[in-house]
């Protein structure tokens, strides 16, 4: 199973999102973990559709620090 973990230092930047999508297209991960998203839970959850991963759990950032996101494919079972 291919996984992708990235300390992205913010996913509000269009270039960062493009890089993330390029990495996902190249490796076809079943699980993607992002830390330091610097975004709200709602904004981060919008990425799941662009990544093609239906499962998602996110934690909002506090100001300009923090934020977590976990995305996964429907074919795997994730327990948090």
Image (spheres, rainbow, N blue to C red):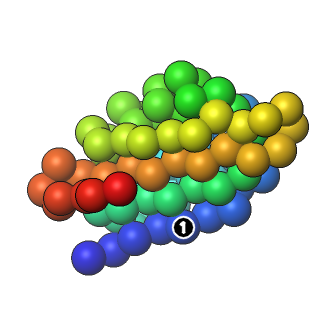
Q: Quadrant of residue 17?
A: top right
Residue at the outermost top position:
42
At horizontal 17% and vertical 49% (from top left) the residue drawn is: 74
Q: In this orientation, does residue 51 appear?
A: no
At horizontal 13% and vertical 56% (from top left) the residue drawn is: 75
Give the secondary structure at mark 1. Answer: strand
Sort mark 1 into few (<14), some (14-19) or many (20+) by Cα contacts within 10 Å. Answer: few
Looking at the picture, does residue 46 appear above or below residue 30? above
Residue at mark 1: 5
Judged left or right of residue 66, residue 18 is left
At horizontal 78% and vertical 35% (from top left) the residue drawn is: 62
The percent coordinates of residue 29 (x first, y second) are 35, 64
Looking at the picture, does residue 43 appear above or below residue 23? above
Looking at the picture, does residue 8 appear above or below residue 37? below
Residue at the outermost bottom position:
1
Judged left or right of residue 46, residue 15 is right
Residue at the outermost left position:
75
Q: In this orientation, does residue 21 appear?
A: yes
The percent coordinates of residue 73 (x first, y second) are 24, 52
């Amino acid at each position: 199973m291919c996984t992708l973990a990235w300390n992205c230092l913010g996913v509000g930047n269009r270039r960062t999102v493009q890089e993330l999508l390029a990495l996902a297209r190249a490796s076809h991960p079943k699980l993607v973990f992002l830390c330091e998203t610097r975004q709200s839970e709602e904004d981060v959850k919008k990425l799941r559709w662009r990544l093609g991963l239906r499962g998602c759990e996110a934690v909002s950032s506090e100001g300009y620090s923090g934020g977590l996101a976990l995305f996964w494919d429907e074919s795997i079972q994730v327990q948090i």
